[in-house]
Amino acid sequence: MTDAAASSGRRTLAGRSGETVDRLLEAGLEVLREHGYEQLSMREVCRRAGLTHATAYGYFSAKQHLVSEIYWRRVQKWCETPVVSGTQQERLAAVFAELAELAATEPELSVAASAAVLSRDPDVARVRTLIGAAMNARVRLAAGPGCSEDVLDALGIAVSGAMVQAGMGYSTYQDMALRLTRVARLLLPTDFPERARFDR
């Protein structure tokens, strides 16, 4: 693959062989669990998936792209679950706790994703945008329709920063959830008009 093709950011998995994608993602997660992000290599992923380098690079530009896609699929599954009912604060606390559980369930993946999504690779940037949009939508849903855009923006920044800090080992994911809940309490007044129970 030429440098121009690699930098175009036009790789998309839509319409590609689902079986091949799954083999690469499964092999990538397997290697990641065993060796960690630093030792993850596309060569080893290809070997375990039983595919050639040429095939693999037709789907993923680099290991950062592969890891980002694995993480994106986990986030998608999380976002498909309904937000719990309760007050605004209860809903946000539940979403933050779910995010912590998502990250703690696959710690190797979470640490790897924290590094991978920061890549300047245009293919990674596309997946990073999808991940960020999905997380922001989840927070928006939990906050409710009356929450201001400024508060939602601040919560989005807080989530991104907390995820990076936890991924770097500065806190546990459980502590991250508690810190985000405290941030939400600071940003949202106790007399917020949307106090009713939340039913989807």
Image (cartoon, rainbow, N blue to C red):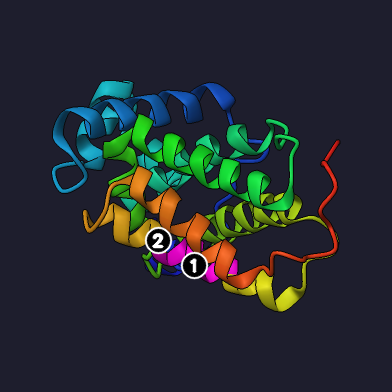
Other-residue count near label 2 (Cα within 10 Å), few / some / many at <14 / 14–19 / ≥20: many
Residue in the picture at 34% in, 55% down:
114
**Circle 2 sits on which residue?**
162
Marks 1/2 in contact by CB < 8 Å: the verdict is: yes
**Secondary structure found at label 2:** helix
Main SS, magenta residues: helix
Tell me which amino acid carries mark 1: Ala
Task: Please check the rendered image and state whether residue 149 is part of the magenta-colored stretch, yes or no.
Answer: no
**Circle 1 sits on which residue?**
158
Q: Position of residue 95 (x, y in %)?
A: 59, 44
**Secondary structure found at label 1:** helix
What residue range appears in magenta? 155-161
Would residue 119 be seen by someone viewing this image from the given angle? Answer: yes
11 or 184, nearer to the observer: 184
The C terminus: image quadrant: top right
Residue in the picture at 67% in, 49% down:
138
The N terminus: image quadrant: bottom left
